[in-house]
Each structure stands twice: as structure tokens, then as C-alpha cells.
Amino acid sequence: MPVEIDIERVAHLARIALTDDEMAAYGKQLVHILEHAERVQALPTDGVEPTSHPLPMVNAFRSDEVTDPLSRDDALAGAPDVEDGYFRVPKILDE
Amino acid sequence: MSDLADLTIAQASAGLRAREFNAVDLLDAVERRAAITEAHLHAYLTLDREGSRNAAEAADIALVGGDPRPLLGIPIALKDNMVTKGVETTASSQILAGWKPPYDGTAVRRLKDAGAVIVGKTNLDEFAMGSSTENSAYGPSRNPWNTDTVPGGSSGGSAAAVAVGSALGAFGSDTGGSIRQPASLTGTVGAKPTYGLVSRYGLIAFASSLDQIGPLARTVPDAAMLLEAVVGWDRMDTTSYHGDVPAISRSLDVGVTGLRIGVITELTGEAFDSQVTEATNATIDRLSDAGAEVVEISLPAIEYALSAYYLIAPAECSANLARFEGVRYGLRVDGSTTEEMMARTRAEGFGPEVTRRILLGTYALSAGYYDAFYGQAQRVRTLIRDDFTTAYGRVDVLVSPTSPTTAFEIGSKTEDPLTMYFADICTIATNLAGDPAISVPVGLDDRGRPIGFQIMAPALGEEVMFRVAAEVERLVDFTARPRLATSEVVAP
């Protein structure tokens, strides 16, 4: 299938504020890269299971033990804006 | 050789125990080497002078008490995508500039518990995305064999540091070749273990189903010793392997008599430097002469590895890098709403290659495309894995060049992303299969640039992989050192 990318929508989904020039450049590059993926798409894979881990692991259970969590102060220490023990952000909802 | 910075880890460990020198002397030698070479190489982003000094002094006290831990007092470097408590960790990105993590990653914790002295944090392609270390927000690293060329990537800083002696060993991460390819380009040994053998907790995630931490060292036994210090199940990583770990260094001295070695027929041809092919073939001949049975093996599906990788890795990266949003750590660029703040922060904080891969992955995972791209790539991954499984029914290990070329000039592959992606043509398939692989230096080309030889093994086959690697090392006897590692070089 021919590759068509709505780069503005992709940039919005990725939450990256690109300029129009940047969007045009990335859009072209993405099409170029995805054209190389077409050969992967053309491979017959009916009945083939996807692989995500090479070892036969199903569940990763462990004992339910209480351990020391990261302290609030430590968790907040690297944040760009903090107030009263919370991460501080600009307003989320329009009034 | 009188400079302690030129010792292997095994030699240094023996010297410490024999009281020929102490751990502080060893650290001093490595820091002196860094003081001379860093202006040429930029292998390090951060030197942790206080932490390393304290660790070396503690090691000296423990050594007096007869402490047997093999890495005690050994100066090592860590790729800057490995989280280190209280020591700046940036993954070479502006978006994490100044971030001092509140915890140690599991591999880091285990190295500290082993008594290793962490010299500093090494440069990488931003978030480990690249094959040259040119994609660092803090400037490229250079190859100590020729400073006009790249050290490979993404673990290029770790590789350069080991090659030149500003660390006796190092750790990197390998998602598509990021340990093995820089090892190849710098004349060092680099190993990617089986997926799940080393905990990824505290490794800043790029593509979680592919990422593995592994060692870089001057010799195969040193690499084995480093790897042994970090392997094993970890409750903090649900993908880590819970069974018995392989006996990584048990068979280093056994040789290759009776082993069956498969040569991958797809990884040769016109796209490969002729000198790389010649050195690969010469090494295979030596293994044959040393008693191995050599056969040619075709793995047809690996022709699709590169394309499948460039769907899987960007898809997983776009999800993993969503965490960088200007709230919890690192950079924030102001905006009138939270969403605007996040989008501006990410535009400002991510470099071009990272942005490109996030966009590619976001597209590949977006509604209507998930199965056509990511799902299909994961199924192709199964076909590649099946090819390896079939091959390992016939042979014990597979071999190939590590990189299709030797070190290339800085700036020569930065224009077209696809030419850079091709640098990983030999290494990517093992990441997709989840199997271990190692690169061992086997010579120099006529321009004096190192050539690496790759040995691959089935999952948890580290013992036979290191066994063959150690024999290659003995047979080839690669002893050349970069000019920058010799005493005639001074700081500019």
C-alpha cells in the first residue's frame, strides 16, 4: 500500500510541537523509511505467533513483600516545579 | 608496559591482590589517562571524582582484609543511560540535563556491591538511538584509533574509554548492536547477553523487548568477568530470567575442537568492506584449523531484520519516551496549558533522530496501523527466531562480521538516516531473536582501523559463545593499541 502520513496528526499524538518546516521534513523522511518496511508487510505470516521474549516466560510472579518505596522528597527532587509535596503543572482545564 | 591504565582487569585484579599497587593508584592512572585523552575523544559526559575516590579508598581497606571479590577496586565506566544515584544521568539528551537520579539501577547496584570503582558516565547517541555517538546532545565522541572517525554507537563513549584506557572495562546497552558495533570499531570486546539475563531496571528504556545491558572490555575473560557481576533475576524487572544463569567463564580455556560453527551466508557480499570479509574468512579458517567443523548456514528471514527492527524499535521508543513530559524530571519549557508545556518541552528536549523515531513509532502504533506494522514486525521476528532455532539444531554457534565496515568519518552518514541504519545489518537479528552475541577484534584494515568478528549463540548459550570468543582471541592475538593510548600523546 502507498504510504501516506498525516504528519500533523502524528506530531499531535506524540505531543511534540513542530514547526511547519520540521513537519514537512519529518513527513518525507518517515515515508522514505516506511517504504523500506513494505517488504516486511509483504511477507506471508498467517498463523505465525508474534515474538516479544525469547525465553518461554508466561507470568512473572513474586512474593508480595513490603519494601521501602522511594520517599516523596526523593521522587520530587528532580522535578522542574514542585509545590507542597506535589508536581506542579500549568492549568489543565479551560474555565 | 608500566602504566596501570594499560592493564587488563584480570592483571589489575591480580596486581591489587599481590599489593603491587593499590586501588587508588589504579584510579589515579585511569584519571590521568582520561585527563590526556578526553580533549581528543569526549568519551565521558561526567567524571564522578568524589564517588570514584571514595570507592577506591573503600576497596583498598577491603583488599587489606583479603576480600576476594574479583572486581574490587577495578575502575569501570557506565553508559549514561544507566541510572546512577546522585550522579547526573542524561542519556545524552537535553531533556534530562542536570537530572540526578534518586536510585541506582540493578546492574549499577550489583557493580557497586562487587566493589567496582565507577569512574564516570559515558557518552552515547541520545537515548541509545544511533550507530556513531554523533546523535549526542553534548557533542560526538571520537574513535581513539583515528579521531576523524566515529567510535560507533550507541555505546561509543564506553567503547572509546575502554580502547584508550580511561576505564579498564565498561558497560553499555545493546538494542540493535549498540555494544557490539562500537566494540568492533574500537578494537575492543563487547557482548550482548541473552535477553532477560541482565535486569533492565534503571536502564533508561529505548525498546524494551530488545534492550540489554552488557560489558565492553579489552579481553574476552575481562568481558566475562564483568558480565558475571550483573547477571541474574531481579524482582524489579518482570522480564528478567528466573532460572539458573549460564556458566559464562567456565569454558574459556577449552578451545573449539569438535564444535560446529555456522557461517551466515546472508552476511557477506558487495555491501561489506572487502577487508572486513577477508579478516572474517581468515578467522574462520583459523577456527577450522583449531579443530572446529565449519559449515555454511542460510538464514533467509534475516534479510527482513533491519526493516522489522525499524518498526519495532520506534514503536516501543514512542511509548517509552512518553514519560518525558516536563513534569517529573528534567527540562520544562513553559506553556499556557499543561499540554502545550509538554509539547514544547518535548520539541525542545529531543534531538532530531529521537524525534524522528518517536514520530515513526507513534504512526506505526496509531489506530488502524498497529497490526499492519508492529504486529506484523513481531510475527516476522518469530520467522527470524525460527531460522536461528533451525540453525542451532545443526551448529553450536554462528559467526559473521560485526559491522559491514570499519570506523567511518564523522559526518559521513548523518544526512540520510537509512545509511546509518545499515551499520547494524549484522547485529540486529540477534536482538530480534533475543539471543546472545559478542564481538572480538581480529585485525586492522590497511588504514589502521579495527575489524570485529561476531559470534552468536542460542539463548542462554553464553558459555559456548565465550568459549569460542576466547579461542578467537588466542588464535588472532590482537595486541595493537590506538596511538592515543600510548605515552607520547599529550593534552592539546
Image (cartoon, coloured by chain):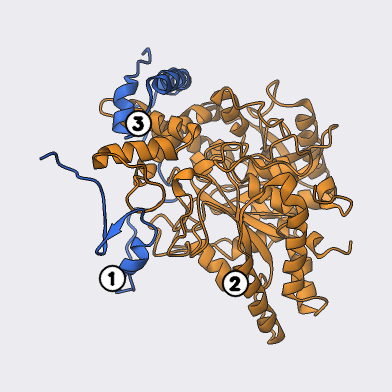
Chain colours: A blue, B orange
Q: Which residue is mark 2?
A: B114
Q: Quadrant of the N terminus of chain B?
A: bottom right
Q: Amino acid at mark 3?
A: Ala
The answer to whether residue A47 of the structure is visible from this angle is no
Q: Which residue is mark 1?
A: A64
* Most distant residue in the bottom direction: B65
Q: Amino acid at mark 2?
A: Ala
Residue B410: image x %, image y %? 68, 32
Residue at 34 percent across and 59 percent down: it is A60
Q: Nearer the viewer, mark 1 or mark 3?
A: 3
Q: Which residue is mark 3?
A: A17
Residue B471: image x %, image y %? 77, 52
Separation of residues labelled 3 and 2 (CA atoms)? 45 Å
Q: Image check: A88 left or right of A46? A: left
Chain identifier of the residue bearing label 3 in the image:
A
Q: Amino acid at mark 1?
A: Asp
Instruction: Tell me whether marks 3 and 2 sit on the same chain.
Output: no
